[in-house]
Amino acid sequence: MVDSASDSTRVFRIPTDDATAPDLMKSARITDPVISIIKGPQTGNTFEIIDPETSIGRDPANAIFLNDMTVSRTHAKIVRTPFGTTIEDLGSLNGTWVDGAIVTAAPLHDGSTVQIGTFTLVYHERTPERIETGE
């Protein structure tokens, strides 16, 4: 005999203070775009994207210094123009990923995720708005 209670679907809710990817920007007021590390050795670091070009890499001379061997010395750059913001891979060994796809160049939008080596970063153009789910 099969217990009907064991066949039913159960819903488990993760407490908001136990999120896998923390909302590091929830209380910040953004004036310039920023990119935040949400996974990797430097989790929690946030970098303002102020200049027209922002370099990313393992070399400390980069504006965004990602200290890990999975990152190339000059890995990528973020380019701001009046038409939008893009990220360009600079011939890195492990590639640059945007929203789950490997790219040579791609536009960045508010909430875009960027993977460089072991780092996962999130790009924000404005202060995130919390969406109420009714729970």
Image: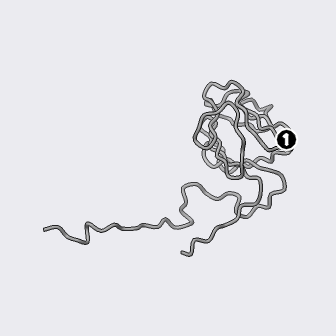
65 is higher (above) or lower (below) than 20 = above
Q: Kindly indicate the quadrant of the structure image that contains residue 128.
A: bottom right
Secondary structure found at label 1: strand
Instruction: Answer above or below: position of 52 versus 132.
Output: above
- Residue at horizontal 77%, vertical 46%? 47
Between 82 and 38, the one nearer to me in the picture: 82
Q: How many marks?
A: 1
Mark 1 belongs to which amino acid? Thr
For the C terminus, give its image quadrant.
bottom right
Asked which quadrant contains residue 7, the reply is bottom left
| Label 1 CA crowd tier, 10 Å (few <14, some 14–19, many 20+) | few
Q: Whole-percent x and y of residue 86?
A: 75, 39
The x, y position of residue 88, in whole percent, is 73, 33
Percent x, y of residue 12: 42, 66
Q: Nearer the viewer, residue 69 or 32?
A: 32
Specify whether 97 is left or right of 30.
Answer: left
The quadrant of the picture occupied by the N terminus is bottom left
Color encoding of the figure: one colour
39 or 96, nearer to the observer: 96
- Tell me where residue 48 appears, x and y as whole percent: 80, 48
The residue depicted at 62 percent of the width and 24 percent of the height is: 93
Considering every residue shown, the one lying at the far left of the view is: 1
Residue denoted by label 1 = 81
Residue that extends furthest to the bottom in the rendered view of this protein: 134
* Quadrant hosting residue 3: bottom left
